[in-house]
Image (tube, rainbow, N blue to C red):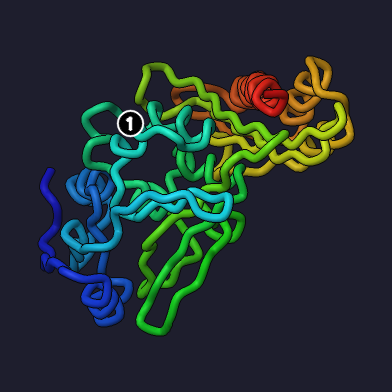
Amino acid sequence: MKPAPFAYTRAETVEGALDLLAEHGNEARVLAGGQSLVPLMNMRRVRPNVVVDITRVGGLSGVAADDGRLRVGALVTQYELERRGGIDAALAECLPYTGHYVTRHRGTIGGSIAHAEPRGELPLTLLTLGGSARVRSRSGEREVPAEELFLGAYETSLTPDELIVETLWPLAGDGEGHAFVELAQRHGDFTLASAACSVRVEHDQIRSARVGVGAVAERPLLVPEATRALEGATPGEDAARCAGEATTDAITGYDDLHASAAYRRRLAGVLVAQAVRRALERADG
């Protein structure tokens, strides 16, 4: 199939892109890497009247560590960040699973977050690490925590005139460990389930934790039951097992052609246990 007719316009600056989004509102879609938008347009699952191309906008391609966070410009490609040293362990683990090798050369970090694919690796990792997105519109700028950003399948809390200009990823400090794991039928395909974990260990006790799962609901989810199973526990196999069991008991899952809801629940629990083990190993140095 081919896309429905649309108008194409290219922005050269952030301000120019914001003007176009303000002018066209819900009728516009932003083109960054195009690895999700273009196939959806070809299948006519989305039919924007206007496509705003931001691929040549300057100032959105930087990567820098600042105040315990990695700041990643919206137009940084998944491949570029994957090949870069010094990024967070969970982010480094999720990137090779984000699409296929070829698409990662074009797909962007900001585009993946804005797309809000419920099975997406980057949204889950941003949520679990407690990251955020910096967004701009003609009326100003704000930082949106990941907990407030993802509302549903392909749905975010951004207004039609807002543009993600940067994502912010917390880096693991002393005594902290992050991890990401997933399982798909074929590497690069949509995941059957995924899990991420962030822990902080002090004096042989888990002081804080965040556990997230993906591909089990219409958006990536934090699992507070798994967090409660971890916080205050002694780091080790028992803590990981309890977090996995708490996850299986807490989530619902869904049925599709690839897996049943029961399988997804069990798989998510197994993956959470694996992510917790890996995160605890890293927290221990």
Horizontally, residue 221 falls left or right of residue 90, namely: right
Amino acid residing under circle 1: Arg
Please provide percent x and percent y for residue 114. Answer: 40, 55
At 84% from the left edge and 36% from the top edge, which residue is drawn? Answer: 231
Residue at the far bottom in the pictured view: 139
Please provide percent x and percent y for residue 104. Answer: 28, 35
Residue 29, quarter of picture: bottom left
Q: Which residue is at the front of the view, 135 or 271?
A: 135
At 10% from the left edge and 62% from the top edge, which residue is drawn? Answer: 5
Reading the image, the residue beneath label 1 is 83
**Quadrant that contains the N terminus:** top left
Secondary structure under the numbered disc 1 in the rendered image: loop
Depicted 139 relative to depicted 13: above or below: below
Please provide percent x and percent y for residue 247. Answer: 73, 30
Residue 266 shows in the view = no
Depicted 104 relative to depicted 53: above or below: above
Q: Which residue is at the front of the view, 282 or 150?
A: 282
Please provide percent x and percent y for residue 117. Answer: 43, 44
At 45% from the left edge and 31% from the top edge, which residue is drawn? Answer: 92
Horizontally, residue 248 falls left or right of residue 11, namely: right
Horizontally, residue 160 falls left or right of residue 50, namely: right
**Quadrant that contains the C terminus:** top right
Q: Residues within 10 Å of mark 1 (few under 14, many from 20)?
A: few
